Image (spheres, rainbow, N blue to C red):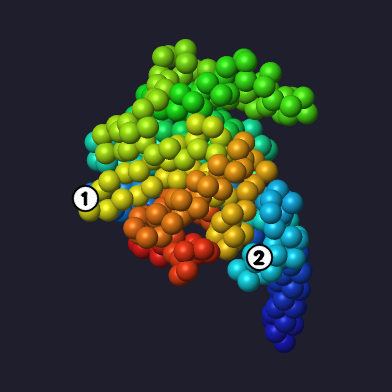
Amino acid sequence: MKNLKLLLLALTLGTTTIATTQAAEPTTIQAPKQVAGYYHHQMGNTQITALLDGTNYLNPSMFKGLSDSEKSDILKKYAAKNDKGVQTSVNAFLINTGKQLLMVDSGAASCFGDHLGSIYNNLKASGHQPEQVNGVFLTHLHPDHVCGISNNGVAHYPNATLHISKIEYDFWLNPKTVKKLPKDKQAGFLSTVEKIKAALAPYEKAKKVKVFSDKSLALGDIQFKPSFGHTPGHYSFKLKVADQEVVFIGDIVHSHTLQFDKPETAIEFDVDPKTAVQTRLKHFAEYAKQGQTIAAPHLPFPGIGHIYSQDGKSYQWMPIHFKD
């Protein structure tokens, strides 16, 4: 009888201990962070890797030529309406030919805050090393495309040569440019120039900056395609892979909703809005007709897909389907 009482007491104490332990456990499950932002897309023997720098939100007022109700209706149609603004990605792209590793644009690094700046780490997570990059093709010199090439005066891609349009290079780095701008634009321009200079500095020192001026220029399988307007020397780059083409379009578009439904819509960042709209209309029509694969820095990650039009006036973004 004594042993039975001791056993019952032990069981009671054990149950109490378990209950106490269970009560002390947290009542919520922590949400893990998003996985690394990279996506491999195979085209023949060439691999295109999209790298995510981060997600940005733009104030709808930045998109010009549409009423508030028009913007609201378009965003609602694409289930893209939210309180933060018009969502846009910041992407860059790697081209692995098997012999070379090339990069198109580089992201913002720390130039815009903590919500961007992941490309360098995502490049390594994707299975590549920064030292493997042979060349970086910059569509233009806005900080969300150029700041990612270096950090605190140290080149992120020490073995890479930068390729930049001469028109673009001169626009931002010629000290005479600022004098031609309205007074209220000069401070913002000079702030951007300082970021550009800091990003380029280690490459300039190593003499690894090449400017190009020939509109029909090509380097290997990459053709240089002028797409002026967003900035004066903005270029897209076209890569031929066997019987396929992929075009790295740069900033001819910033929204997969507003500027596809209404491609005549400019954005506040355009240096020359009229020319930027003309470029978008011309290039959208070409890509919709010819069916090239498109790689875009400001369309939803991975930013690779096709442009479709039923009537030649409005367009749709057709993202690629995931492949393992």
Choose the circle earlier in sequence order: 2 or 1: 2
> Which element type, helix, strand or loop, lies under badge 1?
loop
Looking at the rendering, which quadrant does residue 319 occupy? bottom left
Residue 261 vs residue 43, the one in the foreground: 261
- Amino acid at dot 2: Leu
Residue 25 vs residue 101, the one in the foreground: 101
Locate the N terminus by quadrant: bottom right
In this picture, residue 180 sits left or right of residue 312? right
Tags 2 and 1 touching, CB below 8 Å: no
Residue 322 position (above or below residue 1): above
Locate the C terminus by quadrant: bottom left
How crowded pointer 2 is (Cα within 10 Å; few <14, some 14-19, many 20+) is rated as some
- Identify the residue under disc 2: 75
Residue 46 position (above or below residue 21): above
> Residue 28 — which label?
none
Please say whether residue 152 is visible from this viewpoint: no
How crowded pointer 1 is (Cα within 10 Å; few <14, some 14-19, many 20+) is rated as few
- Identify the residue under disc 1: 242
Q: CA distance from mark 2 to mark 1?
A: 38 Å
**Where residue 84 sits: x, y (%)?**
73, 56
Residue at image position (50%, 38%) is: 228
**Where residue 304 sits: x, y (%)?**
43, 55
**Where residue 120 sits: x, y (%)?**
49, 37
Residue 214 vs residue 23, the one in the foreground: 214
Looking at the rendering, which quadrant does residue 215 occupy? top left
Extreme residue in the bottom direction? 1
Residue at image position (72%, 54%) is: 60
Instruction: Count up the numbered dots.
Output: 2
**Where residue 20 sits: x, y (%)?**
76, 69
Residue at image position (58%, 23%) is: 172
